[in-house]
Image (cartoon, rainbow, N blue to C red):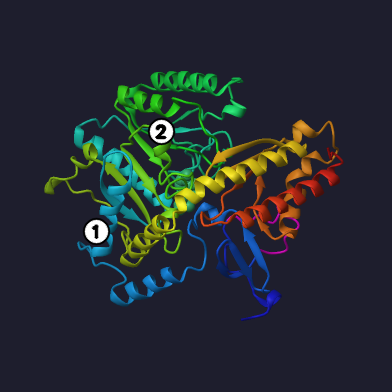
């Protein structure tokens, strides 16, 4: 391998690498391998990945069982020819229908979460085309959530946080409703119940003022990561389900981050008593040992696609790739056998309580939120601390510099530090991460002159 600085990066986009926001990083990390929750770089240094690469590597890095399955399956068959399917994918569809909550009936496989959500929206429109409700074209999403990087998905949820109108002109068919963050409710509510009530009222009002007969789908992630593991108050999801039922709107639940144990249950849906019409899965489905995602549809929707003359015209070359499907099956088997869902729940509780202790001793932390291994610290915003520090507007740059120096793969953005390690994490590894975060916060507070 070429040495360090000799590797030329000029021909490759490094996704999301923003040198202006990260002045302390000369160039992106070049990583070579991983084990458990650690990643090794080109110099042989180990980094702690407390975010499991976009909260994706649920079973941890470097699993030999997964490499063995990939080898075995690739030697048999690496892709299905058109109009055919194979056992790994059939078995995976059956397994997903068996373990997913609600009444899911049929699965369409894709390669990424974005493709799974695109497929969900296309399926919704195709469904209404079949039922004769062709006027249903609008998509409702919640301000501040994220559903993918394609042209159709990028504007969903992004209205307030990143209104990049130059690249993503707002589609007139996008409708936005509030996303409840009980500790930070946009309506100034002082309790989770009040926040739920205000958000539900506003949601209903927006839907009514947008002619409900023209709305196709409501897409939502159950515990969104962007605003920092925002868990709604009791009854919120049940009321959203009721609103969708009342107005004939398809409810698309995006469990791309939350499924496969991330929140201490196999599916985050199990925290509530609702059944979606469409459910999208990715990331933890293979722990990113292969790019694979899935769109599950309920029987009601599937019925519109079952007659042979009503086939769904939609394909990606790698839909349900056999190697990816076999890896997903092995990955789910590992999650089940090693009780990783329970580990996520129990050690998630421990992790959260350790973060809450940090909050007691540090001025920078405003809130601790989360469930299982989907956690977040909300920092006070630069506006909130500018009266104590003249360097308040540099807080993100300073804190991210210390994370980098401590070889901790996390990033503070929009006052949120999202934390989501592999579910196979141990108590000692949590202690190590908490210690590193504590060190970074202390150094930042010192530099800002606001230590407690
Ligand atoms: N939905 C949610 C909630 C996500 O967090 C993401 C990615 O982070 C996506 C969809 C898009 O998934 P992908 O990046 O695999 O396209």
For residue 228: magenta?
no
SS state under label 1 = helix
Question: Over which residues does the magenta segment extend?
Answer: 16-28
Quarter of the rendering containing residue 429: bottom right
For residue 24: magenta?
yes
Please, is residue 339 above or below residue 235 in the view? below
Q: Is the magenta stretch mostly helix, strand or loop?
A: loop
Say which of marks 2 and 1 sits in front. 2
Badge 2 local density, few (<14 within 10 Å), some, or many (20+)? few
Name the residue nearer the viewer: 278 or 22: 278
**Which residue has dot 1 on it?**
90
Please, is residue 433 above or below residue 193 in the view? below
The N terminus appears in which quarter of the rendering?
A: bottom right
The C terminus appears in which quarter of the rendering?
A: top right
The residue at 45%/26% (across/down) is 236
* Percent x, y of residue 387: 83, 31
**Which residue has dot 2 on it?**
272
Indicate if the residue with disc 1 has its beta carbon within 8 Å of ligand 1: no
5 with respect to 121 (left or right): right
* Percent x, y of residue 363: 78, 36
Residue 168 visible in image: yes
SS state under label 2 = loop
The residue at 32%/58% (across/down) is 316
């Amino acid at each position: 391998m070429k040495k360090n600085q000799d590797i030329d990066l000029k021909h490759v986009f490094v996704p999301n690498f923003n040198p202006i926001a990260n002045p302390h990083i000369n160039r992106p990390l070049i990583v070579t391998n991983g084990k458990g929750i650690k990643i090794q770089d080109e110099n042989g240094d180990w980094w702690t990945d407390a975010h499991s690469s976009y909260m994706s590597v649920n079973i941890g890095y470097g699993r030999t069982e997964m490499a063995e399955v990939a080898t075995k399956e690739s030697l048999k068959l690496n892709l299905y020819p058109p109009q055919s399917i194979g056992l790994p994918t059939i078995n995976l569809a059956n397994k997903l229908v068996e373990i997913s909550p609600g009444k899911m009936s049929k699965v369409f496989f894709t390669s990424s979460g974005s493709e799974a959500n695109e497929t969900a929206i296309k399926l919704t429109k195709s469904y209404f085309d079949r039922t004769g409700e062709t006027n249903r074209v609008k998509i409702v999403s919640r301000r501040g959530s994220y559903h993918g990087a394609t042209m159709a998905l990028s504007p969903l949820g992004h209205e307030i946080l990143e209104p990049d109108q130059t690249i993503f002109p707002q589609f007139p068919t996008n409708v936005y409703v509030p996303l409840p963050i009980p500790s930070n409710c946009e309506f100034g509510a002082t309790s989770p119940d009040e926040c739920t009530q205000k958000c539900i009222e506003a949601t209903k009002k927006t839907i009514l003022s947008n002619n409900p007969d023209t709305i196709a789908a409501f897409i939502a992630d159950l515990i969104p990561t962007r605003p920092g593991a925002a868990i709604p108050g009791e009854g919120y999801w049940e009321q959203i389900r009721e609103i969708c039922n009342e107005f004939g709107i398809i409810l698309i639940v995006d469990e791309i981050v939350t499924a496969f144990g991330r929140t201490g249950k196999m599916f985050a849906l199990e925290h509530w008593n609702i059944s979606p019409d469409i459910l999208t899965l990715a990331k933890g489905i293979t722990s990113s040992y292969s790019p694979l995602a899935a769109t599950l549809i309920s029987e009601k929707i599937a019925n519109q696609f079952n007659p042979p003359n009503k086939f769904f015209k939609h394909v990606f070359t790698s839909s349900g790739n056999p190697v990816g499907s076999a890896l997903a099956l092995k990955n789910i088997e590992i999650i089940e056998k090693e009780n990783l869902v329970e580990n996520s729940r129990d050690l998630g509780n421990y992790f959260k309580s350790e973060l809450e202790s940090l909050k007691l001793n540090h001025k920078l932390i405003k809130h601790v939120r989360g469930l299982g291994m989907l956690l977040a610290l909300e920092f006070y915003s630069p506006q909130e601390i500018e009266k104590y520090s003249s360097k308040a507007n540099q807080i993100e740059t300073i804190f991210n510099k210390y994370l980098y120096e401590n070889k901790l793969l996390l990033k503070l953005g929009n006052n949120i530090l999202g934390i989501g390690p592999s579910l196979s994490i141990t108590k000692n590894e949590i202690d190590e991460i908490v210690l590193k975060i504590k060190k970074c916060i202390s150094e930042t507070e010192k530099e800002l002159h606001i230590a407690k």
